Image (cartoon, rainbow, N blue to C red):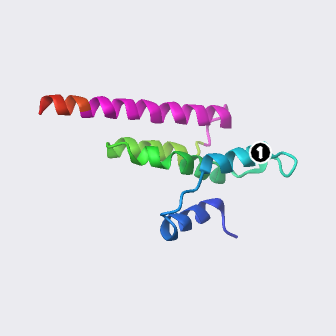
Amino acid sequence: GPTITSLLDTHRILFSHQHIDGFAVLSKLLAEPRYWDPRDILEENFRALVYCIYEERVNAIGVKSWREGIKYEILNIDPDDVDYDRDTFLFDTLVEIGTREFKFRNLKEATTMLE
């Protein structure tokens, strides 16, 4: 059957003008243990939702290699990471995006000063 990833991809293609509040969806999934165990959410789906949350911010970063690197880190699972924790992953992802946004703003300011 369809996965959250394929549904998000379909949404991007057919309904790109409509916003999905990925943070609200993820929060609801993780906060409703009476209906399911949050650990049962497939890692692929969890990461697709995380990317959905931050996609707009990632796409606003003007350095292509930085955007692609962040997207890769969010969507790809490291099978060797035995200390993986979803809360830490969310925090680290937010820090990485914030760092790249800060560096990009500095790069734009430096470029403007050189002109």
As shown in the figure, which amino acid type bears the numbered disc 1? Arg
Q: Is residue 65 left or right of residue 87?
A: left
- Viewer-closest of 44 and 59: 59
Residue 73's spot in the image, x, y percent?
Answer: 51, 42
Helix, strand or loop at mark 1: helix
* Residue lying furthest right: 34
Prevailing secondary structure of the magenta residues = helix
Residue at 39%, 35% in the rendered image: 101
Residue at 27%, 32% in the rendered image: 107
What range of the chain is rendered magenta? 79-108
- Viewer-closest of 34 and 45: 34
Q: Can residue 109 be found in the magenta stretch?
A: no
Q: Is residue 1 left or right of residue 100?
A: right
Q: Is residue 76 visible?
A: no
Residue 38 lies in quadrant: top right
* Residue lying furthest left: 115
Residue 65's spot in the image, x, y percent?
Answer: 35, 44
Q: Can residue 85 be found in the magenta stretch?
A: yes
Residue at 49%, 49% in the rendered image: 55
Residue 4's spot in the image, x, y percent?
Answer: 64, 60
